[in-house]
Amino acid sequence: MYLKQKELLWELDHDFIKGLMDITVKESYEKGAYIFKHGDAADHFYVLIKGFVKLKNEKIDQTVYIVRCPGEIFGWSSIVGRGVYSVSAECLEPAMLNKISRGNLMKLVNQNKENGMIFYKKVAEMLGNRLIHLYAPSSQHEFSVSQGTGQLQEIVELSS
């Protein structure tokens, strides 16, 4: 599940959307190109227009997510207070992206806090949907909420 780009912009006023579009840069990448690597300065976030982008945890050499649906965002480290990217982003095929500078976004959000709050709420929904997808029942694990702590507990199903 993901939010399309128009859903990311839903409920935002016209001036905020125009400001966001004014700070957006459209970029194209070839197959195999890295958009950013783990540990790079997290200065931008991206919205997929077309293509597939693999997000890979280099420390454990594992693909953690494939960005494949137009409107999906990635590079969110840049807008949640992280200084560096926690994964690498590599194009699995030619890709077109909207690139948004963290600094320019923060200026826009600070100029219009109400719309900034709505924007961040939409980003949180997108990230929440991604986490739900990652914990989907396709794995052999079941998750439940522990009593009283609000923490997730993993229950491993043993096959006999």
Image (spheres, helix red, strand yellow):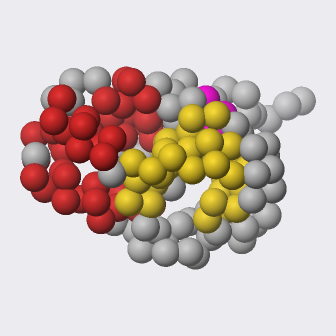
Residue at 47% x, 25% y is 4
- In the picture, measured across the screen, residue 39 lies left or right of residue 55, that is left
Number of numbered discs present?
0
Residues 42 and 100: in front is 100
Magenta run includes residue 35: no
On the image, the x and y values in percent for residue 74 come to 52, 48
Q: Which residues are magenta?
A: 65-69
On the image, the x and y values in percent for residue 71 come to 50, 32
- In the picture, measured across the screen, residue 112 lies left or right of residue 134, that is left
Which quadrant would the C terminus be assigned to in this image?
top right
Residue 30 visible to an observer of this rendering: yes
Residues 55 and 151: in front is 55
Residue 148 visible to an observer of this rendering: no
Magenta run includes residue 68: yes
Which quadrant would the N terminus be assigned to in this image?
top right
On the image, the x and y values in percent for residue 155 come to 63, 39
Residue at 24% x, 37% y is 18
- In the picture, measured across the screen, residue 10 lies left or right of residue 94, that is left
Residue at 30% x, 65% y is 103
On the image, the x and y values in percent for residue 110 come to 13, 56
Q: Is residue 48 above or below residue 41?
A: above
Q: Main secondary structure of the magenta part?
A: strand
Residue at 21% x, 24% y is 11
Q: Is residue 157 above or below residue 108?
A: above
Q: Residue furthest right?
A: 160
